[in-house]
Amino acid sequence: MGAWSSVLGGFPRSRHVRKVLRDYERGSVTHGELEAAVAEASALLIGAQLAAGLTYVTDGMVDWHDIFRPFVESWRNVTPTGLLRYFDNNYFYRIPLFTGKPEPKGLVLAPRVRRFAKLAEPAGLKVVLPGPYTFAAMSEVRGLEREELAEAIAKLMGSEVRAAVEAGARAVQIDEPLLSDQEAERDEAVLAAELASKVAKEAGEAKTILAVYFDVPKAEVYEALLEAKVSCLSLDVIDAPERAAKLIASKGLKEGCAALGLINARNVYDDDLGKLEELFLSLTKGYEGEPGVTTSTWLDLLPYEYGIRKARILGLLAQRLGVR
């Protein structure tokens, strides 16, 4: 059984990129110099993923301060506020404060795709965006209902996806990590699946991936997510392999396509490829859809060198499984 492969999202920043970003904030580096540094860093990361033989690659998103910020800065009626820990990681995000329905000032994803799509060949360039449910739930909201906000975000993300695919993106990933929380309820997952389906509808023929990570979701949450009208559902397996195995044995994998997060993106140790191959084969036994392998979460939680190494290990695992 072959498997397609892709890292889940962004990469860590090199020392040079961190310095340029600091200098830009201090005013000692121009916007043009920042753009040049980010473009160079992105090209290197795309090259590393191509060398690893991955099916889909990201541009690394090294200039994203967090998953929400690029969109916050490109919309009206929202502003970044105080810092809050991003789940249980040593990583923080600025809480978006919405004071009304967001309105676009410009596109986030399409310009990046136009810059990097050709460079990503022969792999496909994948764009990543925060899911509307997680975005709304992790924001502060004034003047409108949270579900109303989530609907508005889904509409804007649909426009982002449509433009990104027209620019050359071949895969679209919608991240809903909040649904891995053991406190999440089925009705929240139903809403998230509905909104992700609306976003994915704008992707045309591109592969669409709904990604849930940081833990294995509860059975009723997972069951609702299986109904999302996306090409593929990505599940973080390695954070809780036994629970993941029980969940998959009980509910199955998404019909058509499923991705398994097997490479641990939250530690620096080399993954045991033999054990991961056995785990993959056991979880996909009898599965008639298209399986994929990915990282457990974004690689930006790791030091730069280890992020690159983990991408290489992912490629080695995919080779063992027979990359499609």
Image (cartoon, helix red, strand yellow):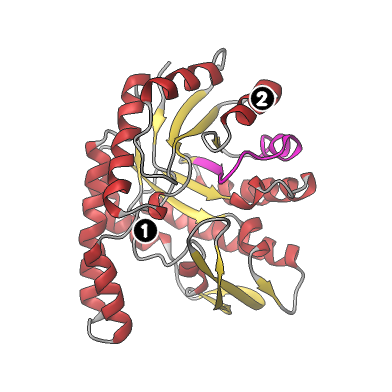
Q: Measured along the vertical axis of the image, is residue 90 above or below residue 185?
A: below
Q: Residue at x 24, y 44 (%)?
A: 48
Q: Is residue 150 visible?
A: yes
- Write down the residue under mark 1: 61
Q: Where is residue 169 in the image (x, y as percent from the top left)?
A: 39, 48
Q: Measured along the vertical axis of the image, is residue 162 above or below residue 237?
A: below
Q: Where is residue 234 in the image (x, y as percent from the top left)?
A: 54, 37
Q: Is mark 2 on a helix, strand or loop?
A: helix
Q: Where is residue 146 in the image (x, y as percent from the top left)?
A: 73, 66
In the rendered structure, which amino acid carries the disc numbered 1? Met
Mark 2 packing: few (<14 Cα in 10 Å), some, or many (20+)? Answer: few
Residue 210 part of the magenta-drawn span: yes
Please state if 31 lies on the left or on the right of 204 as rendered. left
- The quarter of the rendered structure image containing the C terminus is top left
Q: Magenta stretch: give its range.
A: 208-228
- Numbered mark located on residue 247 in the image: none
Mark 1 packing: few (<14 Cα in 10 Å), some, or many (20+)? Answer: many
Which residue is more in the foreground, 160 or 280? 280
- Write down the residue under mark 2: 246
Q: Measured along the vertical axis of the image, is residue 243 above or below residue 82?
A: above
Q: Residue at x 44, y 39 (%)?
A: 264
